[in-house]
Amino acid sequence: MTALLFEIGCEELPADVCVDLERQLLGETAGTTGAGGSTEAGEEGSRGGLVRRLLDDARLWAPARGDDAGDRVRVLITPRRIGVFVAGVPARQTASVQRFRGPRTDVAFDKGVPTKAGAGFARAKGVAPEELVREVVDGTEFVFAEIEETRLPAIEVVPSFCAELLDYLHVPRGMRWGARPTGSDDYLRFSRPIRWLVCKLGRRTVRFHFYDLECADMSLGHRVLGRPAKIINPGVYESRLEEQCVIADQRRRRELIEKGLDEQAAGLGGTWSDPGDVLDEATYLVEWPTVLSVSFDEDHLRLPYVVLITAM
């Protein structure tokens, strides 16, 4: 079992799109960054989310037991990136057995000897007649062929999981950019242009192409204050970005903003308020939050209080 990281790097996303993408990825039961909220999904919370559904489809979601059954899916969103972190990904796909119902037992076998019908059904399903199992359905016994699907290494399945994740994300008014890649039937569309992709399965870099993008292990730091950051493994993702002035966890960004507001307000001998719910939006507008104290000339503060608050 190992950790998976998939980062979608893009131009600045609108705040409301960030919130919506988080809900899509984690499911409707996912919390928000508001007071008491959470952006992690546990065993129940992630079932309806896009990440969990696609992992199930790819057979990359292994049941957790005991101490492993904690929060295994995290979504970290900033204006310039969407990071999906999954703990406990199996080295190979989980087992899956397909069952195919054949003819009635008395048609498939005659005194224990396979008939033409029984042998033909077994041959068509790639099993030996003696490997057919018998089961009673609505009072009638039939033969069944049970076929175990091939279990591919996770490193071979992750690229298709990532591509499907990008394809299934719904964004309002998706835009397109650049030229249509050679061999593609359509343009890549997203809320804002996608500029880079990072995918790590443990220490292994998952390399693949999506449209004209090449997935690798290089992320970008803050647009002004940071530089590119090489992601060695999923566990260092947040720390490497923080070195480049990016706080990837939206909950932590909100906490830093609130702490800064508390400190600035206390220094001025007052308190702060958020009557317009601006804090929710501000959390998704910055990657390196800094709270500053400013003042206005008294001549500009003669309007009624409610007007000033509404305008600001």
Image (spheres, rainbow, N blue to C red):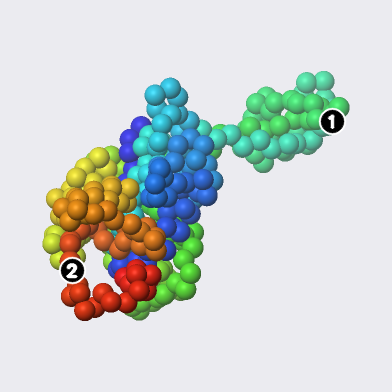
Q: Which residue has dot 1 on it?
A: 138
Identify the mark nearer the N-term, 1 or 2.
1
Quarter of the view holding residue 106: top right
Say if 284 sits above or below 250 in the image.
below
Q: Which mark is residue 19?
A: none
- For this view, does 256 lie left or right of residue 190? left
Badge 2 element: loop
Say if 245 sits above or below 312 in the image.
above
**Cα separation between marks 1 and 2:** 80 Å
Say if 18 sits above or below 148 in the image.
below
| Mark 1 closeness class: few <14, some 14–19, many ≥20 residues within 10 Å | few
- For this view, does 35 lie left or right of residue 258? right
Q: Residue at x 33, y 72 (%)?
A: 308
Q: Which residue has dot 2 on it?
A: 295
Q: Are marks 1 and 2 in contact (CB under 8 Å)?
A: no
Instruction: Identify residue type, mark 1.
Output: Asp
